[in-house]
Amino acid sequence: MKKKVLRETSNTKKNKFQTSMIRPKDVLSSKILHHNLKVLGISIKLLSQIIVDYSVYMKDCVKKEVKETINYLNLAIRKMRISMFTHRNAKDN
């Protein structure tokens, strides 16, 4: 739902007001969360590529731990995206 709110324009001398559509905080915060998850996913992909490039210099045990950590982070991001999507759909109904 969008709320109409009177907001003062930049021209305050004439005291004109305009109506603007303002989104509820939860919709805005979910868009910000979605953007942050997208950036985090891209960062993890870049980190994975760097690790693959430098895996020649790593010990096997370190490689395994790093790969497990990356897989865990990807899984966590997937779960957060799914929960955010189901939460958004539940609010729409």
Image: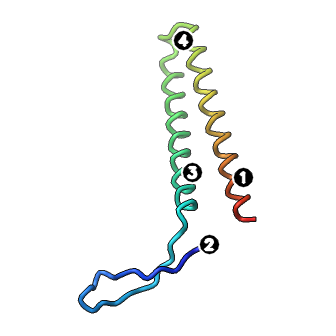
In the image, what residue type sits under mark 1?
A: Thr
Foreground mark, 1 or 3?
1
Q: Which residue is mark 2?
A: 1
Query: Which residue lies most toward the right here?
Result: 93
Q: Residues within 10 Å of mark 4 (few under 14, many from 20)?
A: few
Percent x, y for residue 24? 55, 66
In the image, what residue type sits under mark 2?
A: Met
Q: CA distance from mark 4 to mark 1?
A: 36 Å
Foreground mark, 4 or 2?
2
Q: Which residue is mark 1?
A: 86
Q: Which residue is mark 4?
A: 62
Asked whether the beta carbons under mark 4 and mark 2 sit within 8 Å of each other, the answer is no
Q: Which residue is mark 3?
A: 34
Of labels 3 and 2, earlier in sequence is: 2
Q: CA distance from mark 4 to mark 2?
A: 50 Å
Of labels 1 and 3, earlier in sequence is: 3
Q: CA distance from mark 3 to mark 4?
A: 31 Å
Question: At 70% from the left edge and 61% from the top edge, which residue is drawn?
Answer: 91
Q: Nearer the viewer, residue 20 or 53?
A: 20
Query: Which residue lies most toward the bottom here?
Result: 14
